[in-house]
Amino acid sequence: MGFNYGANFLKLRKKYELSQKDLARIAEVGQTTISDIESGKKSPNVITIEKICEAVGITLADFFVEAEPELEPELRRLLDTARKLTPEQRSYLQKLLETMIAKD
């Protein structure tokens, strides 16, 4: 499954309480471009994504981070714990997890 630009643009637009027309105007893109992206008829190019991000005052990184789905609480705790490990410990943990999965 690919990245859903349309859903994420819609979410972003609603977050900033903008109509398609308003977002198109401040991002200097066509309203049909916004509509086509949100409806899934068209995928945006990098320039369009940058213009829309600039228009609402976020970076490309912010756009893609906001687009990530929320993790389940137990996965969030696991990730938070893994962040505290050294690179060597992370490598060991990765191998351990891969071994556990291979046994199933």
Image (spheres, helix red, strand yellow):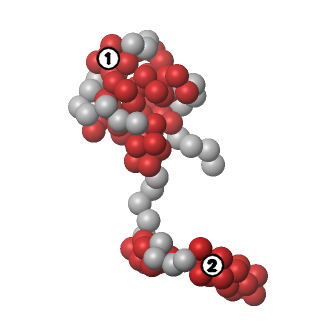
Quadrant where the image shows the C terminus: bottom right
Instruction: State whether residue 58 appears in this view.
Output: yes
- Look at 27% across and 38% down and name the residue there: 15
Element under disc 2? helix
Q: Position of residue 97 (x, y in %)?
A: 65, 81
Q: Position of residue 62 (x, y in %)?
A: 40, 43
Q: Amino acid at mark 2?
A: Glu
Between residue 67 and residue 93, name the one nearer to us. Answer: 93
Element under disc 1? helix
The residue carrying mark 1 is: 26
**Of the residues tagged 2 and 1, which is closer to the observer?**
2
The residue carrying mark 2 is: 88
* Quadrant in the picture for residue 63: top left
- Using residue 78 as the reference point, say whether residue 56 is left or right of it: left
- Look at 34% across and 24% down and name the residue there: 55
Total label count? 2
Q: Is residue 63 above or below residue 86?
A: above
Instruction: State whether residue 94 appears in this view.
Output: no
- Look at 70% across and 80% down and name the residue there: 95
**C-alpha gap between disc 2 and disc 1:** 47 Å
- Look at 41% across and 60% down and name the residue there: 70
* Quadrant in the picture for residue 34: top left
Residue 93, label in figure = none
Mark 2 / mark 1, whichever is N-terminal: 1
Between residue 96 and residue 104, name the one nearer to us. Answer: 96
Q: Position of residue 1 (x, y in %)?
A: 63, 49
Residue extending farthest left:
17
Q: Position of residue 100 (x, y in %)?
A: 69, 86
Q: Amino acid at mark 1?
A: Ile
Instruction: Determine crowd level at label 1: few under 14, some 14-19, many 20+ residues with C-alpha closer than 10 A.
Output: some
